[in-house]
Amino acid sequence: MLTLYTINTCDTCRKARKALEEKGMAFQIHDLRKDGLSASLLEHILERVPLLEAVNKRSTTWRGLSQEEKDGLDATSARRLLLAHPTLLKRPLLEIDDETILVGYRDGDYDKLSG
């Protein structure tokens, strides 16, 4: 089953959810705020998504970080920040199978998925 990692208040996440619903796709939702982001889940995601691609540098949370935190971003500090601030994770993330997680959503991104 597909898993859609979202934040409930994210407009893009809502669009992705609607696209899956319109295709009649079975999926479960994992809300990163409500359901949390554990270290093991983060590692699961980062095994499939490059770390730099996973950090949302356009988010309000990113803008709220100190310049020191932004400038000193490396693999260790990025993991620490993502665990402390799950909203730093780009979203939505659509886990298709054991190997593949799609990052973000634009209209048409899910067209090739079949229910």
Image (tube, rainbow, N blue to C red):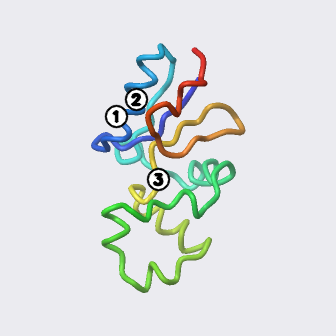
- How many marks the image carries: the answer is 3
Query: In this view, which residue lies farthest toward the bottom?
Result: 68
Is 88 drawn above or below residue 12 in the view shown? Answer: below
**At 44% across and 31% down in the image, what residue appears?**
29
Q: In which quarter of the view is residue 64 placed?
A: bottom left
**At 34% across and 64% down in the image, what residue appears?**
61
Q: Which residue type carries mark 3?
A: Lys
Please rate how many residues cluster around mark 3, counting C-alpha atoms within 10 Å: few if below 14, some from 14 to 19, many from 20: many
Observer-nearest of 16 and 65: 16
**At 60% across and 49% down in the image, what residue appears?**
45
Q: Is 73 on the left-hand or right-hand side of 50?
A: left
Query: In this view, which residue lies farthest toward the front?
Result: 108
Would you name the residue on which mark 2 appears? 17
**At 32% across and 44% down in the image, what residue appears?**
10
Q: Is 34 on the left-hand or right-hand side of 78?
A: left
Q: Which residue type carries mark 2?
A: Arg
Task: State which tag comes first along the sequence, 2 or 3.
Answer: 2
Please rate how many residues cluster around mark 1, counting C-alpha atoms within 10 Å: few if below 14, some from 14 to 19, many from 20: some
Would you name the residue on which mark 3 appears? 90
Whole-percent x and y of residue 27?
50, 23
Residue 14, label in figure: 1
Instruction: State the separation of the CA atoms marked 1 and 3.
Output: 14 Å
Label 2 element class: helix
Instruction: State the separation of the CA atoms marked 1 and 2.
Output: 5 Å
Observer-nearest of 28 and 17: 17
